[in-house]
Amino acid sequence: ARRLTTILRDVRSATAGARAVHLFAELFASRGGEGAIMAARAAQPVVDGDQIRLMCEVLATDLLQALRVSEG
C-alpha cells in the first residue's frame, strides 16, 4: 500500500497508477473477478478454487482499503 500510495501521489505515475488500481479491483476484489477465477484455476488441484477466490477477494479488499485510508 505504501508503494502504491507513492505511485499515486507522483504526478509522473498517478494516471497509470490509478488505472492499475482500478483494474486490480475489477479483477481481484470479488470472487467472480476474472483475476480471482484465473488464480483459482491455476492453483487447482493443489488448493481448492473456492478458497483461492475468497483469498483474492479478502486480500484485494484489504489493499484497497489501506489505499483509501492513506489517501484520506
Image: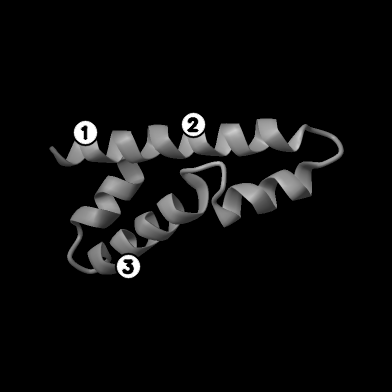
Closer to the eye: label 3 or 2: 2
Residue 16 in the image: above or below residue 3: below
Q: How is the image coloured?
A: one colour
Kindly indicate whether the residue at mark 1 contacts the one at mark 2 (C-beta within 8 angstroms): no
Q: Which mark is residue 55?
A: none
Of the image marks 2 and 1, the number of the one nearer the N terminus: 2
Q: Could you classify mark 1 by the number of other residues whose Cα lies within 10 Å: few (under 14), some (14-19), or many (20 or more)?
A: few
Q: Could you classify mark 3 by the number of other residues whose Cα lies within 10 Å: few (under 14), some (14-19), or many (20 or more)?
A: few
**Alpha carbon separation for disc pair 3 and 2:** 24 Å
Q: How many marks?
A: 3
Q: Disc 3 marks which residue?
A: 16
Q: Disc 2 marks which residue?
A: 58
Quadrant of the rendering where the C terminus is positioned: top left
Q: Residue at x 26, y 50 (%)?
A: 6
Q: Is residue 44 left or right of residue 8?
A: right
**Tag 1: amino acid:** Val
**Tag 2: amino acid:** Val
**Tag 3: amino acid:** Ala
Q: Secondary structure at mark 3?
A: helix
Q: Residue at x 27, y 65 (%)?
A: 13
Of the image marks 1 and 3, the number of the one nearer the N terminus: 3
Q: Residue at x 51, y 47 (%)?
A: 28
Q: Position of residue 65 (x, y in %)?
A: 31, 35
Q: Nearer the viewer, residue 61 or 17?
A: 61
Q: Which mark is residue 69?
A: 1
Q: Nearer the viewer, residue 44 or 30?
A: 30
